[in-house]
Image (cartoon, coloured by chain):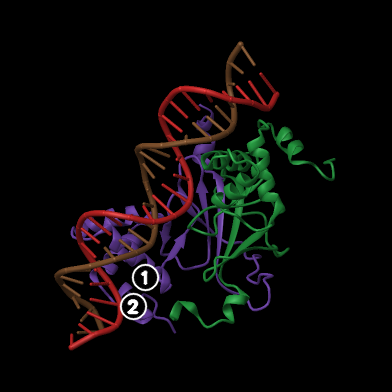
Chain colours: A purple, B green, C red, D brown
Amino acid sequence: MKPQSETSDDAMTRSGIRLTPQRRYVYEALMEKRDHPTALEVFLRAKARMPSLSLATVYNCLDALTESGLIRQVNCDRASSRYCPNLIPHGHFFCKECGVVFDVPLNPSLATEWEVPQGTLVSHVEINLRGTCASCAQKPNTSTL
Amino acid sequence: MKPQSETSDDAMTRSGIRLTPQRRYVYEALMEKRDHPTALEVFLRAKARMPSLSLATVYNCLDALTESGLIRQVNCDRASSRYCPNLIPHGHFFCKECGVVFDVPLNPSLATEWEVPQGTLVSHVEINLRGTCASCAQKPNTSTL
DNA sequence: CTAGGTGCAAAAGGTTTGCGGTTAA
DNA sequence: TTAACCGCAAACCTTTTGCACCTAG
């Protein structure tokens, strides 16, 4: 019986990680917009509210939050990791033209069992789509300009 | 009517990219072992046969081959891109402990249609599993030593 | 009290770029 | 012949690390 609206503090406490102001700001920076910010973007957002915050700490916080399962690291963009607070299983689309990232609902027919060698422990499945977003698709192709 | 055993040369010619010795060696380095080498590993393998080869060229070749659809870039490992010449749709498992990467067959129930906004062009779907491989799972957990 | 977290600055590591020379087609 | 490609080395950018100080529990 998970409470309906658990605060970030509740979540961190429950997951057993130490609750620091930095982690709160990082987590809030991620929650305040449902885009998929890079570590640097999270840093800039959080630093606006906590000027003493350092980028290395943001990396540490993002790692800690990912490790404890409160957020997800998204690897659809090779240039830099992005982070997502949406814990409901879903995929991500990445536009090769403009770099936009958005959530893609998983088709219910997507099986959750995978044919892996016996003894393999699968802790996480990541589904990344790549292509051109609708907005870029109707512009003249920038890659051939 | 695709020929049953197309050579790398055939494939490159057909895909319209210029056929250079460097690209041949890079492609062969990828074909010779069905592991999932990084650019550096491809470089080392190919350089053994073509000592003048440079790492930057390997990056260029891998990009060109990926772009032309002859190989796949695999992003299951954030540390570095890996490359895969297996064009049959499949996923990848990445072991967090030892870094091994292996192919995962796709469950036939996996739908190929994705709920993306109208007009979105999906050119590629990547499925990455993360966890602990069978071999690492039966060792004492190294992350808690 | 103290294990764990933070800030800083420097380093590491993968990847890209600029440029002069080379080559496949 | 020439647009495309190569080799080299430097630059770039994200991420990690070492260390002194600080703080949540």
* Residue C22 falls left or right of residue A3: right
Residue pointed to by mark 1: A64
Q: Is residue A95 above or below residue A18?
A: above
Residue at the spot x=68%, y=77% of the render?
A: A118
Label 2 – label 1 distance at C-alpha: 8 Å
Cβ–Cβ under 8 Å for marks 2 and 1 = yes
Q: Is residue B87 visible?
A: no
Give the image location of residue A141, x and y in percent.
Answer: 53, 31
Q: Is residue A81 visible?
A: yes
Residue pointed to by mark 2: A17
Quadrant of image for the N terminus of chain B = top right
SS under mark 1: helix
Check disc 2: other Cα within 10 Å, few if <14, some if 14-19, many if 20+.
some
The type of residue carrying mark 2 is Ile
Give the image location of residue B105, x and y in percent.
Answer: 70, 63
- Pointer 1 chain: A
Toward the viewer: B88 or A5? B88
Toward the viewer: B116 or A122? A122
- Pointer 2 chain: A
Residue at the spot x=70%, y=36% of the render?
A: B12
Determine the image quadrant of residue A123.
bottom right
Residue at the spot x=70%, y=50% of the render?
A: B31
Determine the image quadrant of residue A66.
bottom left
Q: Is residue B96 above or below residue A81?
A: below
SS under mark 2: loop
